[in-house]
Amino acid sequence: MVLMKTAQILGEMQQALRDAEGLFHGGDYAGSAECYTKALELCDSLPNDTTFDRSRFEASCQAGLSAVFGRLDRPFESFAAANKALLFYEANGERYPADIGRWLMAIVNQGTSLAAFHCFGDAQAAFTRAKELFISKGLDTPQNCAWIAMVEGNLATLAAHLAKETE
């Protein structure tokens, strides 16, 4: 009985994560936030002894929430979610190459939030780190040129802003 309930919860968690991602890509950011939150709540309801990579799942949800909250112009929540995701990815990201996109998303959203807080030097450092990760992982490919251009554009904007501040 408990095994069936655990299996059901795991299935519902995965479905909530898929729904969140679909809603995000469809532009329904509020709906996406609800689904990511539901996935995290379901994860919290699992028994502690469940054999499951809980930290990785939570990091995936938090990376998604960082993007959602960024689109909803909620930089504090985006920053918090990005940092929660980065706690996992900074320690474990190398072990999960399939999650590199989520890791990069969390770094970029952290940088965007820092810029919204007027922490321009820290935002610049985050975007630089994202660009370096793109390059070190061999992700500076034509398929990723839009991401790299966005990061480089953010870096240029921040550099110009910082140059104005020192004048």
Image (cartoon, grey):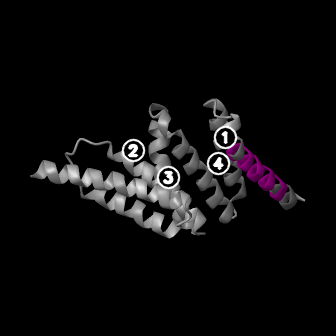
Helix, strand or loop at label 3? It is helix
Residue 59 location (% of width, % of height)? 43, 49
> Residue 144 got which mark?
1
Residue 15 location (% of width, % of height)? 35, 54
Q: Badges 2 and 3: C-beta atoms under 8 Å apart? A: no
Label 2 vs 3, first from the N-terminus: 2
The amino acid marked with disc number 2 is Arg
Query: Which residue is label 3 attached to?
Result: 63
Q: Which residue is drawn at 68% across and 46% down?
A: 147
Helix, strand or loop at label 1? It is helix
Query: Which residue is label 2 attached to?
Result: 56
Residue 166 location (% of width, % of height)? 86, 58
Q: Is residue 54 visible?
A: yes
Label 3 vs 4, first from the N-terminus: 3
Q: Give the range drawn in magenta.
A: 147-161
Residue 14 location (% of width, % of height)? 34, 51
Distance, label 1 to label 2, CA atoms, is 24 Å
Helix, strand or loop at label 4? It is helix
> In this rendering, is residue 70 above or below 91?
below
Principal SS element in the magenta part?
helix
Residue 154, magenta (yes or no): yes
The amino acid marked with disc number 4 is Ala
Label 1 vs 4, first from the N-terminus: 4
Which quarter of the figure is the C terminus placed in? bottom right
Q: Residues within 10 Å of mark 2 (few under 14, many from 20)?
A: some
Label 2 vs 4, first from the N-terminus: 2
Distance, label 1 to label 4, CA atoms, is 18 Å
The amino acid marked with disc number 1 is Asn
Q: Badges 1 and 2: C-beta atoms under 8 Å apart? A: no
